[in-house]
Each structure stands twice: as C-alpha cells, then as structure tokens.
Amino acid sequence: MYSSLEPLIPTEGGLKIPYHSFIPNIEFKDVTFAYPSRPTQAVLTKLNLSLPAGKTVAVVGASGNGKSTIALLLERFYDVNSGSITIGGVNISNLDPNWLRSSAIGIINQEPVLFATTIKENIKYGKPTASDEEVYEAARLANADEFIRSFPKGYETIVGERGVAISGGQKQRIAIARALIKKPAILILDEATSALDPEAEKVVQKTLEGICQGRTVLVIAHRLSTVKNADTIAVLQKGVILEMGSHEFLMNKKGVYYHLMNQENQKSRNYG
C-alpha cells in the first residue's frame, strides 16, 4: 500500500560485515514507524519480534496491517521512528543499505519482475559478477534447471515482454534462483506463492522449504496454510502483534490465529 513511496535512506554508507563473521540473528525491539507522508499514522507500534539465526518466522494478518512494512524496514528502505532493529547485535542504521540488500538479504516477492533478456542474465541480476556455474547451481537449488534446459536455447532463452511465454510458477522459480545466487544468510518471502495457481504453489512451496534450511527467514503471508511449518508465527493486527508461537501452540490457544485458520479452512471447503 505504502511501499511505492520514495524511501529516504541513502543507498550507500555504513558497515559491511564480512560473510564469515555475519550472524543473521534479527531483533526488532519496541519498533514504532509511520511513513513520512503520514507521520501521525503509526503503521507499527512498539513491535517486538525475534528471528533467531537459522529459524523461520512468519508474520500473518490481513492486508494493510503492517506486514510488508516489517520487510521494508529490515531492508532499510526506511529507518524506524523509535526503537531499534539489530542484525547480529549491530543496529541496522549503522549498516550499508546497498550491502544489506545486495549481499545479506535475498527477497522473493509475490510478483517477480523478469527483464527482457536471457534467463541467465535474469538470474545474474542477483549477482552481476556470477559465473555460469553459479547460475546453474542457483537454478538447481530453485528447481528451475530442468525446465530451463528444456527450452531450445536453454539459459540463453529470451524472456520478458517479447520473449518466451513462461508460467507463473516458472517465473517464480527464476526469481528464487536470482535471490539465491548471492547466497544470502537472510531470506524474505513476501507473499511469495499467493499469485500462483494451486499446482504451481505446491511446487514453489516445496522449493522454498528446501532453500530455507540453515537460513534466517522472514515470511510475510496472508494465506495461513503456507506458514504451518514456520518455527514461530506472529499474528499482526493494526501494527501490533496480538499473539505469537508455533502453529500447534496457537491452535491449542484457540485465539485469533485459531479463528483465522478456521475461517480459511471453511473458505477452502466452500470453494474447493
């Protein structure tokens, strides 16, 4: 909703943490934030959220409740109004935004953009200096190598507006390869499967589960069925976390998450 507004953070300047000493342990502490265009309307209020290194944390809730704002703040497109966000104990306001986005964090969105060039160049966009072997390895991890090689021109196939027509699931797997090629320690999955049909969603979901192993992962989701396996699920409403825990814990609690899950299951039965 607000993410198209112009961020105010310079793209360069600040710390770059060497890969071998980078600990992707993320902490949101008492974070309050309002977009510059609406300074009196807090989107997040005193938010506390921990993402332990190597764990998957999902933030769920209806649209417009601040879920994607959490991702924008983590990527440092904006700085918080109060509170702090730290990675490995370092306040991200001290980190180089370009390094954060190009090396530390990989993001997979709902609607990936493919450029009007080859599949290889689309994947290399995540790391322009990548070798061909790095491209192939990223594609293999993203379960994309097989379908790419099935095209007559393979990785040299032109995609985008005037290129070969590819399915939503294939497009998403190319985007996953692009995110993986820089070997990010942190992954953000922002509604990554919500635009796909059920069959493609299953394939992409399985791929995502594989690549999340060993990484710190922030999942932004509207559809609860996609986050059951997360280590922690946080239910966000009007910028405030209402409850937090594993799927089993929240279902047993019979609170907000339990009711949202029942509503979703009911809709699935009605439209199934």
Image (cartoon, helix red, strand yellow):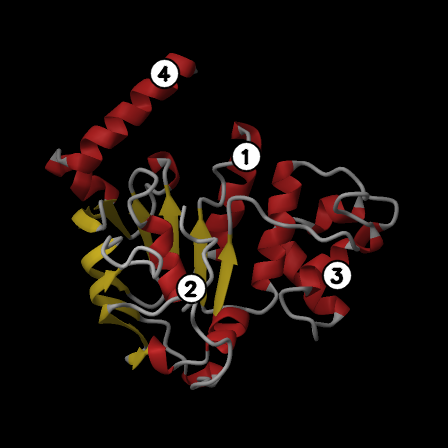
**Mark 3 vs mark 2: in front:** 3
Count numbered badges in the picture: 4
At a point 67% along the width and 64% down the height, the residue shown is 125
**Mark 4 vs mark 2: in front:** 4
- Image quadrant holding the C terminus, namely top left
**What's the CA distance linking mark 4 and mark 2?**
35 Å
**What's the CA distance linking mark 1 and mark 2?**
26 Å
Q: Mark 3 highlights which residue?
A: 121
Verify CB contact (< 8 Å) between mark 4 and mark 3.
Answer: no
Residue type at numbered disc 2: Gly
Q: Mark 1 highlights which residue?
A: 196
Verify CB contact (< 8 Å) between mark 1 and mark 3.
Answer: no
Vertical position of residue 67 compared to residue 19: above or below = above
Q: Mark 2 highlights which residue?
A: 214
Please state the horizontal and vertical placement of residue 62, each as a whole percent of the image.
31, 37
Res. 178 mark: none
Q: Mark 4 highlights which residue?
A: 269
At a point 46% along the width and 49% down the height, the residue shown is 209
Residue type at numbered disc 1: Leu
**Mark 1 vs mark 4: in front:** 1
Vertical position of residue 219 compared to residue 250: above or below = below
Please state the horizontal and vertical placement of residue 4, each as a whole percent of the image.
48, 53
For the residue carrying disc 4, how many other residues have a C-alpha within 10 Å: few (<14), some (14-19), or many (20+)?
few
Q: Is residue 80 left or right of residue 108?
A: left
For the residue carrying disc 1, how many other residues have a C-alpha within 10 Å: few (<14), some (14-19), or many (20+)?
some
For the residue carrying disc 3, how many other residues have a C-alpha within 10 Å: few (<14), some (14-19), or many (20+)?
many
Name the element at disc 3. Answer: helix
Residue type at numbered disc 4: Arg
